[in-house]
Amino acid sequence: MLRLELRGEMSQPMVYLSPIFAVILTFIAGIIMFTFLGVDPVKAIITFFITPLNSLDGLAELFVKATPLVLIAVGLSFGFQANIWNIGAEGQLTIGALAGGGVALLFFNVDTPFLMPAMLVSGVLGGMAWAAIPAILKTKCGTNEILTSLMLTYVGLLVLSYLIHGPWKDPDGQNFPESRLFHDAALIPIILDETRLHLGWIIALFGVAVAWVIMTRHMIGFQIRVIGLAPMAARFAGFKEKHIIWMTLMISGGAAGLAGTIEVSGPVGQIIPVISPGYGFTAIIVAFLGRLHPVGCLFAGLLMALTYLGGDNAQIEMNLPNAVTGVFQGMLLFFLLACDVLVRYRFRIGSLTKATGGANL
Amino acid sequence: MISKKIILGALLSAVMAVGATVGQAADKRTKVGFVYVGPIGDHGWSYQHNVGRLAVNNAFGDKVKTTYVESVPEGADAARVITKLARSGHKLIFTTSFGYMNPTLKVAKRFPKVKFEHATGFKRSKNLATYSARFYEGRHVAGLIAGKMTKSNVIGYVASFPIPEVIRGINATFLAARSVNPKVKIKIIWVSTWFDPGKEADAAKALIAQGADVIMQHTDSPAPLQQAQKNKVWAVGQASNMAAFGPKAQLTAIIDDWNAYYIQRTKAMLDGTWKSQDVWGGFKSGMVKMAPYNKAIPANVVAMAEKAKEGIFNGTVHPFTGPIKDQKGKIRVPAGKTADDGMLAGMNFYVEGIDATMPK
């Protein structure tokens, strides 16, 4: 009989190597898949993962696509480390986009350098406000934040739908459900001419740096990790769990709201019915792929963004179906989980034997 | 250390070499690109545009190479995909969903030498044309049949977004159905999506439960038709002939036929005669067609439908002929007049008799 047995001690390097193994395995499985599809596998892998990056524009697009993923994933990783499961980043992104974009519409055609910062702050506050609901419910009523944050995503999307079908509809838009195009002062500055690369990417990088400092050098990061790993010990040490719930939900909600505002004031430039193609959910994968580490999230976000760009490219260059993108993302997650299992457990053949060293947690 | 660097260098140069050969493989055919909002397997809207693309392939053979990108979200991603097509040498690019309007306009500005065509929008520029079909002509014919075929006098309508095109379709259906059946009512469910078989099916189920025995849809999947088939009520197919998904249920389907338009515009681009324009084609130009009528429809109803179709073709029948009042009783089209294109394009009111409020 084959069974899984907890390894006595996890190999620390393996914890960080497991995503790399997952990527390699995804490549191998991809090669097998392409061979069966009758497509030249080497050409397909190159088209998918390398040609998107062989131009300045391609790199810029990679960063544009990765910006919301990295920002949200970094925010989420705080909560995930403390076992606070904010699944509703998509909703916080939407409300953040509305809060930030709302400022742009409210001050339409007002030309002031203060508009952009005001939008970003408003976006952060919008995301925080939406994340505050699960925070209140969890701290006051003990409600499960997985459910409340997820459900609020759908409420957020309905708020968006209401606003663009009603009060925020473009008056010159022939009744189509979208807002006016933002004026120039409400558009986030482009930092690389002839591309769409915008200041949001720098904000995301800054976010990674700040998160890294908080996580490794600050008391808050320490408390978050202790609560996640050993809640009893944290309580014993006098860490206030409610504070951590609030703190992590505000960080993740604020980051998602910021990402939403950056999207509408950056590559989109107006409020439309579908602001995000699921960044809030994809970012959950990114956070785990990045080992809940800010720098890991950065690389994972870039990799995930690359799979989208590669998907476009594979369709344009090789007429491969769009489903290939989904298959790659699915395999990546699958292999990551598989590798993680093998880092934590080992296969044993035969019946139960005495645990070999280490404590069964 | 050195050996590592050498290996890395070798790897990199190998990758670049392969990349270069991939680049060189580009041929001399003129490239035409298509951007779809759904998967080509939606059997509706995107499917029909892809049929049009294949018609271009057939018509020009070795002269033209077509490319498509499917399921492109109508947001930040659209501009990236369109840019990518423009950058990779496509000379003519069709973007086939309303939500691509602003992204297409933005990209068109950046690539003045590339021609763009945007379906169902209203923003044009020197190198950006727009095109759409008068689906409401098909809705008129379908509405007549529905009005005659319904026993419960309730038509169920699965609608996507309250934009003029969809409102126009609902009004055209209702006016036609009422003209042959004064008792007819219409129930509308908004699903806020163009393609989501699950949601579309749920809406159809709800409508059937509310007594509708003819299901019409302005969404792209055959799911509502399948529900109609399952529940033994009638339905009208959308965008393509969906009979395979509900052979008993489908009364007819309103078919979007882009083939001729795509061939004509590709030819114009090749000849150098391409100009930005706004085309709105219907039965007459062949952009809208009706699928074969269900054999269960009585001959006199078929004859009535055919007569209406011919009338629209000849210009003797207009689906929006006055007097047309809105829900408040205000006259929008006076008696003896027909609605002009400007009014049709921006239609944002329900006609009198529709017992529903528009989603705000």
Image: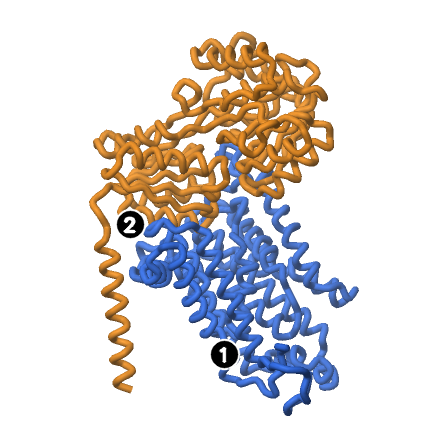
Chain colours: A blue, B orange
Marks 2 and 1 sit apart, C-alpha to C-alpha, by: 38 Å
Q: Which residue is drawn at 37% across and 44% down?
A: B68
Q: Residue at x 57, y 56 (%)?
A: A93
Q: In this view, does B99 lie to the left or right of B55?
A: right
- Mark 2 secondary-structure assignment: loop
Give the position of the C terminus of chain A as an image quadrant: bottom right
Q: Which residue is drawn at 44% across and 26% down?
A: B133
Q: Is residue B85 left or right of residue A78?
A: left
Mark 2 residue type: Ser
Q: Which residue is drawn at 58% across and 56% down?
A: A90
* Mark 2 neighbour class, 10 Å CA radius: few under 14, some 14 to 19, many 20 or more: some
Which residue is more in the foreground, A270 or B150?
Answer: B150
Mark 1 residue type: Tyr
Q: Mark 2 points at which residue?
A: B88
Residue at mark 2: chain: B
Q: Quadrant of residue B260?
A: top left
Cβ–Cβ below 8 Å for labels 2 and 1?
no
Q: Which mark is residue A16?
A: 1
Place of residue B147 in the rendered image (x, y in percent of width and height, measured from the top left): 63, 18
Place of residue B215 in the rendered image (x, y in percent of width and height, measured from the top left): 63, 28
Place of residue A211 in the rendered image (x, y in percent of width and height, measured from the top left): 53, 74
Place of residue A80 in the rendered image (x, y in percent of width and height, measured from the top left): 61, 71
Can see residue B203?
Answer: yes
Residue at mark 1: chain: A
Vertical comparison of A38 with B42: above or below: below
Which residue is more in the foreground, A128 or A144?
Answer: A144
